[in-house]
Image: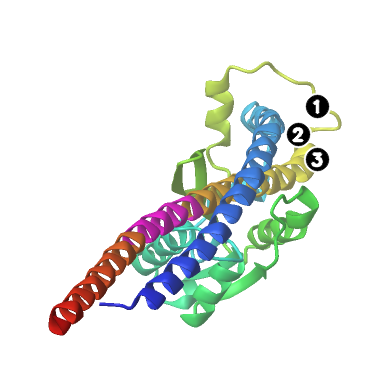
């Protein structure tokens, strides 16, 4: 059995760790509120630009653009969103596991795919396994704005327009609630379903100036970039929620450990006191 001193040291050490995890939980909760608000505020813009693009692309048979054309998939790019730090439960591992399994299932060689990654955890994961990483961003802000991701999103879209890739998919954690995040994989490019969205949305018609093709040249890349930014905001909210829950669980575990150690400490102390009493009684008896 551990000595009283050892038990007391472990109780003190666990108590200090508990204070740290509790503080990290509170910080993550504060960041979550802001991140959730950012995601909700971006949604109306995302829905409106989707409506306009769908209307232009689906409202006429004459509108053409490389981003609307489905072609033979010779190379796929995976846009993977992770975090720069751990201590977030299964937030990163779930995304990376999903991506890795998809790549292993669908591709025979590294010539058939490439990875665009946000976050140090994801970058280290793919580099360690010698998987091709075309572009990466490390050090993304906890509350990113569009300028933080504009260049990366633009470069990803340009890869498709230049036919360096034939398909672009994004893999990230979708924020459902503060206690639930879901790994999501979406096809971003080509935008082959855009005409169907126009049909099912029941939106009104627009008049275009100068013409649909000229508008699509500007609007479609912006739309694709907005999809990437929306996924990033969604992922950031999930990250803060996952870290908050992980730190809460760590705090609860620390409480359980402290309770168990305190019980062991009290039992050991009681045993020591009983032993001392017995020794005193034995000594008195020996003197009689």
In the image, residue 56 above or below residue 151 = above
Secondary element at image label 3: helix
Q: Nearer the viewer, residue 67 or 92?
A: 92
Secondary element at image label 1: loop
Q: Residue 284 location in percent, x, y?
A: 19, 78
Q: Residues within 10 Å of mark 3 (few under 14, many from 20)?
A: some
Q: Residue 28 location in percent, x, y?
A: 61, 50
Q: What residue did someone put label 3 on?
A: 214
Q: Would you identify the image quadrant in which residue 258 lies?
A: bottom left
Gap in angstroms between the C-alphas marked 3 and 2: 6 Å
Q: Kindly identify which numbered label has been placed on residue 286.
A: none
* 286 relative position to 141: left or right: left
Quadrant occupied by the N terminus: bottom left
Q: What residue did someone put label 1 on?
A: 208
Q: What residue did someone put label 2 on?
A: 212
Q: Residue 34 location in percent, x, y?
A: 69, 41
Quick check: marks 1 and 2 in contact, CB under 8 Å? yes
Asked whether residue 230 appears in the rendered view, the answer is: no
Q: Residue 222 location in percent, x, y?
A: 74, 45
The part of the chain drawn in magenta is 247-260
């Amino acid at each position: 059995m551990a000595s009283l001193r050892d038990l007391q040291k472990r109780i003190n050490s666990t108590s200090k760790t508990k204070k740290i995890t509790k503080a990290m939980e509170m910080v993550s909760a504060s960041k979550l509120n802001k991140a959730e608000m950012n995601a909700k505020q971006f949604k109306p813009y995302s829905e409106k630009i989707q409506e306009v693009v769908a209307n232009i692309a689906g409202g006429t048979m004459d509108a053409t653009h490389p981003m609307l054309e489905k072609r033979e998939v010779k190379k796929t790019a995976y846009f993977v969103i992770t975090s720069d730090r751990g201590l977030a439960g299964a937030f990163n591992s779930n995304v990376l596991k999903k991506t890795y399994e998809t790549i292993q299932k669908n591709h025979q060689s590294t010539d058939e795919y490439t990875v665009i990654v946000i976050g140090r955890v994801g970058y280290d994961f793919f580099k360690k396994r010698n998987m091709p990483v075309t572009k990466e961003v490390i050090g993304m802000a906890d509350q990113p704005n569009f300028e933080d991701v504009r260049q990366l999103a633009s470069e990803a879209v340009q890869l498709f327009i230049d036919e360096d890739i034939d398909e672009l998919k994004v893999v990230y954690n979708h924020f459902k609630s503060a206690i639930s995040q879901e790994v999501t994989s979406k096809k971003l490019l080509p935008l082959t379903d855009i005409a169907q969205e126009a049909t099912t949305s029941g939106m009104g018609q627009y008049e275009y100036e100068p013409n649909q093709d000229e508008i699509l040249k500007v609007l479609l890349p912006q739309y694709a970039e907005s999809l990437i930014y929306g996924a990033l905001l969604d992922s950031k909210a999930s990250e803060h929620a996952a870290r908050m829950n992980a730190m809460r669980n760590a705090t609860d575990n620390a409480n359980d450990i402290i309770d168990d150690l305190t019980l062991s400490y009290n039992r050991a102390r009681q045993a020591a006191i009983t032993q001392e009493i017995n020794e005193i009684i034995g000594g008195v008896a020996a003197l009689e």
